[in-house]
């Protein structure tokens, strides 16, 4: 796994990959079947919204 596949929490500084992240549904009008929000597994803060649907 490369550093590009890792995420960092701006609040607590934790570094983690997508498998470790807490996943939540997105806010707004994004389809939750194709988009998920990755949150810090330690702090719970939203880190990034990622595409998880089919290409």
Image: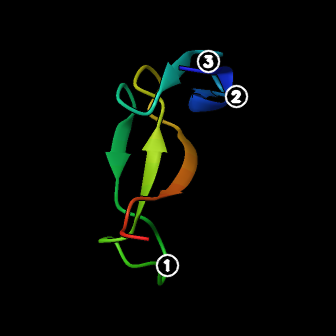
At mark 2, the secondary structure is: loop
At mark 3, the secondary structure is: loop
Residue 46: image x %, image y %?
A: 53, 44
Q: How far apart are labels 2 and 1 at the CA level?
A: 22 Å
Q: Which residue is labeled 2 in the image?
A: 10
The reply, left or right, for residue 30 in relation to residue 6 is left
Name the disc covering residue 12, or none: 3
Q: Dot 1, crowdedness within 10 Å: few (<14), some or many (≥20)? A: few
Residue 54: image x %, image y %?
A: 36, 69
The reply, left or right, for residue 48 in relation to residue 42 is right
Q: Earlier in the sequence, mark 2 or mark 1?
A: 2
Q: Which residue is labeled 1 in the image?
A: 28
At mark 1, the secondary structure is: loop
Residue name at image x 48 percent, y 30 percent: 40
Tell me where residue 6 sits by quadrant: top right
Residue name at image x 29 percent, y 71 percent: 33
Q: Are marks 2 and 3 in contact (CB under 8 Å)?
A: no
Q: Dot 3, crowdedness within 10 Å: few (<14), some or many (≥20)? A: few
Q: Is residue 15 above or below residue 45?
A: above
């Amino acid at each position: 796994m490369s550093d590009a596949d890792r995420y960092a929490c701006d609040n607590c500084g934790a570094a983690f990959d997508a498998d470790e992240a807490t996943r939540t549904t997105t806010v707004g009008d994004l389809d939750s079947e194709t988009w998920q929000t990755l949150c810090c597994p330690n702090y719970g803060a939203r880190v990034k919204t990622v595409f998880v649907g089919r290409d």
